[in-house]
Amino acid sequence: SLSDRLTSTFKTLRGKGRLSPADVDATVRQIRLALLDADVSLPVVRQFTAAIRERALGEEVSKALNPGQQVVKIVHEELVRVLGGESRRLHLAKNPPTVIMLAGLQGAGKTTLAGKLGHWLKEQGHSPVLVAADLQRPNAVTQLQVTGERAGVQVFAPEPGNGVGDPVSVARRGVEHARARGHDVVVVDTAGRLGIDEDLMRQAADIRDAVQPDEVLFVLDAMIGQSAVETAKQFDEGVSLTGVVMTKLDGDARGGAALSVVTVTGSPILFASTGEKLTDFEVFHPDRMAGRILDMGDVLTLIEQAEKAFDAEQTAKLAGKVERGEDFTLSDFLEQMQAVRRMGPLKNMLKMLPGMGDMKEQLEQFDERELDRVEAIVRSMTPAERDDLKILNGSRRARIARGSGTQVSDVNGLVERFTQAQKMMRQMRSGGGMPGMPGMGG
Ligand code: GDP
Ligand code: MG
């Protein structure tokens, strides 16, 4: 398995102090295999691993993780980012009804999804209607009617007995019906195709032009694997997709198609379908999908534990240093700051503290970017400068400001505040510690 392979890669990397191209390449090679195993298409794997390699080589070496772990962490972060970061919501029309058109290969799960979407939308307080614009297969309309009934959602279908109707006209009348009856969302089910079929694609484009959808969702069977790229590309060219829904994620496919399709179409994944029942449906979570594609939950857990252990170690080391009467330097400060920031945005952390509710307004004004600036300034200093601020002459300060993209006045401000803080800590020590602050005495 990938975990085994990576563990052996980690073994050979352990003990090295920094990310060298060889370290990065060894891990990237394993990641490449893992992605191919997960059925990500080759061009997408190439593009993705090239981006990873570039980012990993530019990365400052972590003290908490070995190089292999550090590369894996970068891979996971990038995968989550490419898969959409935070989940994207449905685009709702300013003037209802919102029109959602479903497109995809035959058997992808469009009709099933129409029922699930209808059910979910109803739960969200909407009043949806499903439109049966798949007149290709004889029982397609009946299938949607049965699904709609199960979901408790109205279905608009062509009158029976009029021969084969025109799906474009049904779709248009479906939207008119929704508008007239006050339905605020319309889900248009369309005919699938087994392969790429020009007539059916033209029909889908005609339906799209007729109903002017707010969302064109590409329904993608997670089991489809490598061919996802070509299929998605064709549908994107044919009907201009705005989003993707992954289906059959209850199967054992690793879901590499997700990465392929998002890369090729540039459309985010909105929902995940995980079974045949109406409720086997959820908003898509990029982080879960990233974990599934990489198939290395245990490695990611290890990484998390290593970082936590490192933070605890740093805190203990720092406490010992202060107790021994040594100066708290900017190097210590940088390590502390990184440990704190790894725990997430400070604003959110502070909000979790009891009694912080009263300070909501101040918290809203708290600017994470100020921390970014401080961190950039400290990072632009050499280790010697961090440990002895007295050597910071004018030209060094100018260099640090340039390197950190700040002003010399910002550098001066930080140096001044930090020198004050150091002085205060020294006084506290010589004064036998501040009352009420155990552990700060010397
Ligand atoms: P369509 O041709 O795109 O409309 O696909 P259907 O909605 O008719 O689905 C094709 C088959 O896949 C049906 O047997 C569905 O029950 C099944 N199906 C749809 N979604 C899922 C899913 O998320 N998981 C599983 N296991 N089966 C699904
Ligand atoms: Mg169908």
Image: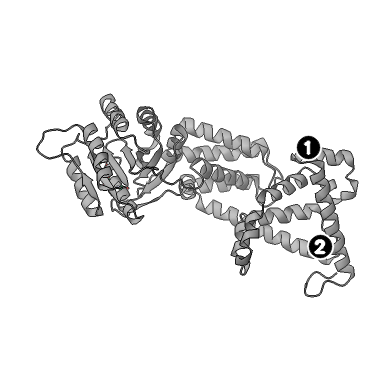
In the image, is residue 92 above or below residue 120?
above
Q: Secondary structure at mark 2?
A: helix
**Image location of residue 251, percent across then percent down:** 35, 48
**Image location of residue 5, percent across then percent down:** 53, 45
Residue drawn at (65%, 45%) of the image: 67
Q: Secondary structure at mark 1?
A: helix
- Ligand 1 under 8 Å from disc 2 Cβ: no
The amino acid marked with disc number 2 is: Lys
Which residue is label 2 attached to?
A: 321
Q: Residue furthest top?
A: 198
Estimate the spatial distance between the alpha carbons at disc 1 and disc 2, rounded to whole Å: 32 Å
Viewer-nearest residue: 329 or 298 = 329
Q: Is residue 330 visible?
A: yes
Horizontal side of residue 288 vs 150, given as left or right: right
Residue drawn at (89%, 71%) of the image: 431
**Image location of residue 73, percent across then percent down:** 58, 47
Confirm or deny contact between disc 1 and disc 2 (CB under 8 A): no
Horizontal side of residue 157 vs 321, given as left or right: left
When asked about the image quadrant of residue 436, the answer is bottom right
**Nearer mark to the viewer, of 1 and 2:** 1
- Ligand 1 under 8 Å from disc 1 Cβ: no
Q: Residue 402 shows which numbered tag?
A: 1
When asked about the image quadrant of residue 171, the answer is top left
Viewer-nearest residue: 246 or 96 = 96
Horizontal side of residue 316 vs 133, given as left or right: right
**Image location of residue 350, percent across then percent down:** 63, 62
Q: Earlier in the sequence, mark 1 or mark 2?
A: 2
Q: Residue furthest bottom?
A: 436
Horizontal side of residue 432 vs 190, given as left or right: right
The amino acid marked with disc number 1 is: Arg
